[in-house]
Amino acid sequence: MIIIAGAGSGKTRVLTYRIAYLMSQGVDAFNILSLTFTNKAAREMKERIAKIVGTSEAKNLWMGTFHSVFAKILRFEITI
């Protein structure tokens, strides 16, 4: 799902509840990727999701800024 909307329109809330709903329906957190433009939005979303589904489940989410998530993927996939 892609949500494109202006500031203050509720994007973070929509994504937070959508991710929490998917997890409550049995979707593994490792199968969810959530990309944001700011660290603040990513941190806020993860905190909100942790309150809904629990901290242990929320820690397994792939959530962050475009740069941080892709840097993490590159670190996992590096071969020397």
Image (tube, rainbow, N blue to C red):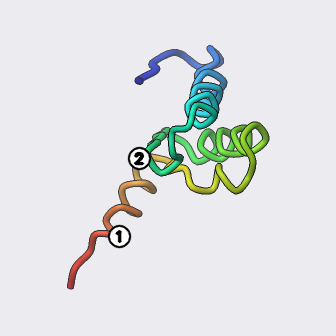
Q: Amino acid at mark 2?
A: Phe
Q: Does residue 19 appear to the left or right of 73 in the view shown?
A: right
Residue on which disc 2 sits = 66
Residue that extends furthest to the right in the rendered view of this protein: 51
Q: Label 1 crowding class (10 Å Cα cut-off): few <14, some 14-19, many 20+?
A: few
Q: Secondary structure at mark 1?
A: helix
Q: Amino acid at mark 1?
A: Phe
Q: Earlier in the sequence, mark 1 or mark 2?
A: 2
**Quadrant the N terminus occupies:** top left
Residue on which disc 1 sits = 76
Of residues 33 and 38, which is closer to you in this image? Answer: 33
Inter-mark Cα distance, 1 to 2: 16 Å
Residue 4 location, quadrant: top left
Task: Tell me: residue 28, above or below residue 17.
Answer: below
> Which x, y percent locates residue 64?
52, 48
Of residues 45 and 19, which is closer to you in this image? Answer: 19
Of residues 23 and 2, which is closer to you in this image? Answer: 23
Of residues 12 and 56, which is closer to you in this image? Answer: 56
Q: Does residue 37 appear to the left or right of 75 in the view shown?
A: right
> Which x, y percent locates residue 43?
65, 47
